[in-house]
Structures are given as C-alpha cells and as structure tokens.
Image (spheres, rainbow, N blue to C red):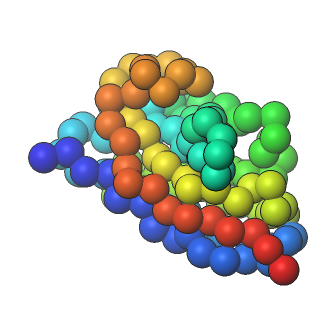
Amino acid sequence: QVQLVESGGGLVQPGGSLRLSCAASGFTFSRYTMSWFRQAPGKEREFVASITWIASRTYYADSVKGRFTISRDNAKNTVYLQMDSLKPEDTAVYYCAARDSPSRSFELKEYDYWGQGTQVTVSS
C-alpha cells in the first residue's frame, strides 16, 4: 500500500535549521511531483514547496523562498526539505504530498497521497 512517512521534525531555536525527510513507498515515486505543505494551529494547510519529477523544477511559497530548499533522491524514494534561518512563524505540522502529474499545484485537492505529518516548533 501507499505510504508517505515524514521525519526530522522537532524543537529548534529561531535562526536554527532542520532537515525534514519523507520516505515514499507503494507507488512510482520518480514519476510523481512531490510537495511540502504545513498547517499551523488554527490555520488552513498551506503550500510550502514543490519539486516536479520532470527536470526536478522547484517552487516555493514567498514566505520560505531563500530559506528552504526542497530536493529529491529517486534512488531512495525520498524527498527532503532543508529549512534554514527558521522563524517562530514557521511553527507548524509539516506534511509531504504526492501528485501524479509532471506539474506542481498549490491546491490540496490536486494531491493523491499524504503523509501523517511531522511537528516543527521554532521557539527560544
């Protein structure tokens, strides 16, 4: 069966870094666009970053551009999110999602599979 398992979340001080991983199984990972979303308490889930399977094109929300980097390793069926210069407003549950399409989407409904999420807390 399809699984997306996130890991790497935790508590970090402002200005610090974390690297999230999402291990995929049960589908042809190399042919899926992969994205990260996040959901803060009391807020809607929002797009963070995306990487397509064609040419590994990347896209970022304005709020994380220049601080976060998405990457993928098709040999390991894993997508990563390197988060640097973290801010308290980055605190959220982070989810990875898979889309059976060569293009990215900001819309939750366009994604076929979701992970269970990993908590990231940025606080001093």
Residue 7 shows in the view: yes
Residue 70 shows in the view: no
The structure residue drawn at horizontal position 58% and vertical position 38%, both measured from the top left corner, is: 45
- The image shows residue 115, relative to residue 118, as above or below, that is above
Lateral position of residue 34 relative to residue 112, left or right: right
The structure residue drawn at horizontal position 79% and vertical position 74%, both measured from the top left corner, is: 123
Lateral position of residue 16 relative to residue 91, left or right: right
Whole-percent x, y for residue 57 in the image: 60, 30
Query: In this orientation, which residue lies closer to the viewer: 9 or 93?
Result: 93
Q: Could you tell me which quadrant the C terminus lies in?
A: bottom right
Whole-percent x, y for residue 74 in the image: 38, 48
The structure residue drawn at horizontal position 81% and vertical position 34%, both measured from the top left corner, is: 62
- Quarter where residue 47 is shown: top right
Query: In this orientation, which residue lies closer to the viewer: 38 or 82?
Result: 38
- Quarter where residue 105 is shown: top right
The count of marks equals 0
The structure residue drawn at horizontal position 82% and vertical position 62%, both measured from the top left corner, is: 88
Q: Which residue lies furthest to the left in this view?
A: 1
Whole-percent x, y for residue 20 in the image: 55, 63
Whole-percent x, y for residue 121 in the image: 68, 68
Lateral position of residue 28 relative to residue 33, left or right: left
Query: In this orientation, which residue lies closer to the viewer: 84 or 42?
Result: 42
- The image shows residue 33, relative to residue 109, as above or below, that is below
- Quarter where residue 111 is shown: top left
Lateral position of residue 23 relative to residue 119, left or right: left
